[in-house]
Image (cartoon, rainbow, N blue to C red):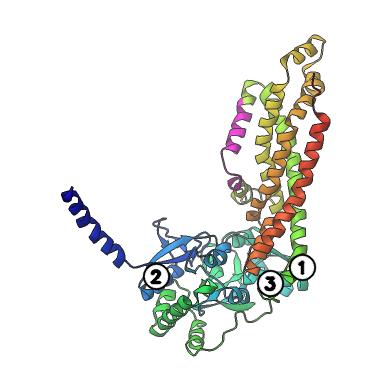
Amino acid sequence: MRILLAGFLAFAIPTLAIAQNAAPEFRWAGDPEGGAPYVEASPTDPNTLVGFDVEIADLIARGLQRTPRFVLISFYSIDQSVARGDADIGLSGIEDTVARRTTMAVTVPYYAFREVLSVRDGDAASYRSLSDLSGKRVATLAGTIAYDILLRAEREYGLTAVSYEDDVHPYSDLVLGRVDAVLLDNILADRRKRTISGFTIQPGTIASSHYVGVLAPSNAALRDRINDILRQAMRDGTLEQIFRKWQVWNDEQPPLYKAVLAGETIPAVTGTDTGESAATISWWRATLRYLPALLQASVVTIVLSCMSMVLAVALGMLIASGRVYGQRGLRMLLTGYVELVRGTPVLLQLFVLYYGIAAAIKLPAFAAAFLGLALNYAAYESEIYRSALEAVPVGQLEAARTLGFSERQVLTLIRGPQAFRFALAPMMNDFIALLKDSSLVSVLTVMELTKQTQIFATNLGSWVIPGTLCAALYLAMSLPLSAGARRLEERWKAPTL
């Protein structure tokens, strides 16, 4: 026993000593999806992250004598996740805004960028500024300075702001003609220009801002240490080397570094007035400001859901009838469709409809969302109706045929009505599920309720009020449906014998 104890101590004591001497972690948050050149998967090794924010995170970690550890967080949730302690800092092309300065501990700016307008080559002479785009569709990323600028331009110039989840598809859709212009950071525009032809970056600057790191408000001491590391990297040229490596160094950076090192106050955004930030006003005024947009997005959600469900019900009935009454070949074909749709994510199906077949068929965003949801739910509805058709007692069907009813009469007069009654409850459950699944169509630039709520939360710096309003609106839409379904079930309930 003493030998075993001695052996355990001989192993455990060095192990504990190594653990105590190991450098603590420096957790930094980012989003590789659409995160180039800030944070992205390496083209040669998908398990390795590259980007200038990756190298800046490593630089900060070395200065803090810590080990960097990447934490994958959706871009729109980085502020909230950092605030709750999921990571020490957020670094993923985080824009310097009044809202972030109000709600987070923000580092000194380490890169200056410009908001630039991109248009198709043939429109370069016509669309030079936002005022030239009245009645046109202008794309950008949601929850960004550019999106705030476009929201104001909607009111002033009558253009339509179209939000995307990544920085690739705005430019591909611009070339395809789905949008008329793109407003984004010059870094993103220049990068996409190298891989996508057919558009021109206008030389004018719509607005200017900077990239910063964001920390929890209670982490100001760590923020100050990081600021010292960033300032030193500005002095010795380390940051310049990183940005030159990524081909994004330009003449706008030296004046920024000079101002930072001199301790000057640097405005969050210059060149335009994006309006009063939601984070700097009371929650009541912020709610009043965003409530009309949330209500409008709710209308989009309910209209899209109702239209998709109507088509899904019609297609589901046809598929179910074909599987019950059709020939072997037709049954196999319909079964294959059902299994294919149920076996693949609806998000993938939406991407295929909108982006995958764009070279052949350029569906509008709403049409692609409508068809995608309808075709997906049709597969599930068909299984409900097939089960309901097969639940009708065989004796009734045989009695009808004995009385001389044709198969069509049996289906429409006897089997169909009873099957519909059996299917009512699960059908209404599917409708409510579809109402919530409609939130996925935001990836196709459809501004539905959840997406508008996400933008509200990003601008406010909190999910409490936007999330509460969103939940209340979804309940206001779904509860009447549930009540109506229960009433129909009671009305059509089969009499007990």
Which residue: 68% across, 37% down? 378
Q: Are marks 3 and 2 in contact (CB under 8 Å)?
A: no
Q: Nearer the viewer, residue 118 or 58?
A: 58
Report the mark closest to the observer, 2 or 1: 1
Count neighbours of disc 1 (C-alpha within 10 A) and say few if under 14, some if 14 to 19, many if 20 or more. Answer: few
In the image: residue 255, left or right of residue 329? left
Residue 259 colored magenta? no
Circles 1, 3 touching at the beta carbon (< 8 Å): no
Q: Which residue is mark 1?
A: 288
Which kind of residue does numbered mark 1 sit on? Leu
Tell me the SS state at disc 2.
helix
- On the question of residue 119 being in view, the answer is no
Say which amino acid is labelled 3: Ala
| In the displayed structure image, the side of residue 45 where residue 302 appears, left or right | right
Q: Quarter of the image for the C terminus: give it.
A: top right
Magenta-drawn stretch contains 345: yes
Q: Which mark is residue 278?
A: 3
User: Is most of the magenta stretch helix, strand or loop?
Assistant: helix
Q: Position of residue 312 (x, y in %)?
A: 72, 38
Left or right: 188, with 303 as reference point: left
N-terminal of the two: label 3 or label 2? 2
Could you tell me which residue is drawn at 58 percent across and 36 percent down? Answer: 340
Q: What's drawn in magenta, residue-wise?
A: 332-349
